Image: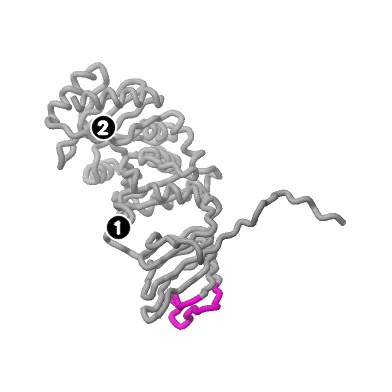
Amino acid sequence: MSLPEVVTKQDKLLTVNTNAGKFLEGLLHPGIKAYPLFLDPHNGVWVLRVKFAPGVTLPLHFHTGTVHIYTMSGAWYYTEYPDQVQKAGDYLYEPGGSIHQFNTPASNTEDTDTFMVVTGSNVNFTPDGTFPDHEPNPLLPENREFIMRKVTEERADLGIAWDGDADRCFFIDDTGEFIPGDFVTALLGTMFSKREPAATIVYDVRASRAVADSVKAAGGNPVMHRVGHAFMKVKMRELNAVYGGEVSAHYYFRDNWFADNGMIPALLLLELVCGSGKKLSELLAPYRAKYFISGEVNSKVADVPRALRLLEERYQDGRITKLDGISVDYDSWHFNVRGSNTEPLLRLNLEAFSQAEMEQRRDEVLALIRS
């Protein structure tokens, strides 16, 4: 019997000698030298040789996948299992879903040298009020890059991020794309409108028309109001509104004393995705195909009242309201401009029914504001 023909022909073996190579120092954590051997972030596989200096303590962390560790020299242990010290020649298998804190004893006289295969992702749980990775505000694009990347790497159904005090909740869909707060308000507002006929849903002046359109289509009663939790809560109590949402990712609930909460929207969106049988990106597709939003764009201005007056004069042919700043509505686009309460800033939120018109109108309004 002849041998099968080789499918992948190699001129030489894919091999590397880590003793002859250069370790990366301080990349993962102080006191760690790492030599990456095989990295496959798409499938979540990491093969590394890692050396730990004496006295290293890693953050408490959660493994979504399995870990294999073979110790070649030195000693280490998990805080949770202080009596099971791993030494030269020990192999450890760690099942997925485990939570541990890695330590090397300060009494070690040599580096602890390990070979490890890690699958899935590691999530640090040790609280650090200095926020070493990034500012705890997912509304800023640079602060959500990590979770957006992780969602795609892990092929997750969605990602959830909270701000520093967890009263705001942000979502990433299954494609790794950030979901604006007004689209979340539209999704949950629709859910509540279907559950409670003629339910009142309060939203802020910056929001996409997706909110009012979706709520009306589901039989609800959308009510626009001023930005800010103090105003939202008062209006919701006044109207006995079942739900309220802001672009800033504050979400309010009648059954939570009309207060905002960061955990309830996370549970509700999970319920919505599971119950719909659709991916989150599929639920959002109708919004993304029709409503093109600028996001909030800030501009420093020397004279805020003058800039608002110029906007009112320039767009006097539109439908103008002054519930909070100035809002101008046309059939195919609209915008709101509000002044900051603490800084000489004007904040623009604009939407149109096409990407091209949104960009054109955004630039047009910004040019007037900054003139």
What is the x, y in percent for residue 53?
39, 72
Please name the residue that numbered disc 2 is placed on: 348
Residue position for label 1 = 131
Tell me the quadrant of the picture where the N terminus can be found.
bottom right
Q: Is residue 188 above or below residue 100?
A: above
Q: Name the outermost residue toward the bottom.
A: 83
Give the residue type that dot 2 points to.
Leu
Q: Residue at x 33, y 23 (%)?
A: 360
**Local SS, label 2:** strand
In the displayed structure image, the side of residue 307 where residue 263 appears, left or right: right
Q: Does residue 153 appear in this view?
A: yes
Q: What amino acid is labelled 1 in the image?
A: Phe
Asked where in the image residue 133 lies, by quadrant, the reply is bottom left
Q: Which residues are magenta?
A: 73-92
Residue in the image at 61% along x and 56% along y: 14
| Residue 38: quarter of image | bottom right
Q: Can you give x and y, in whole percent of width and height, for residue 62 in the image?
A: 45, 64
Q: Is residue 196 visible?
A: no
Q: Residues within 10 Å of mark 2 (few under 14, many from 20)?
A: many
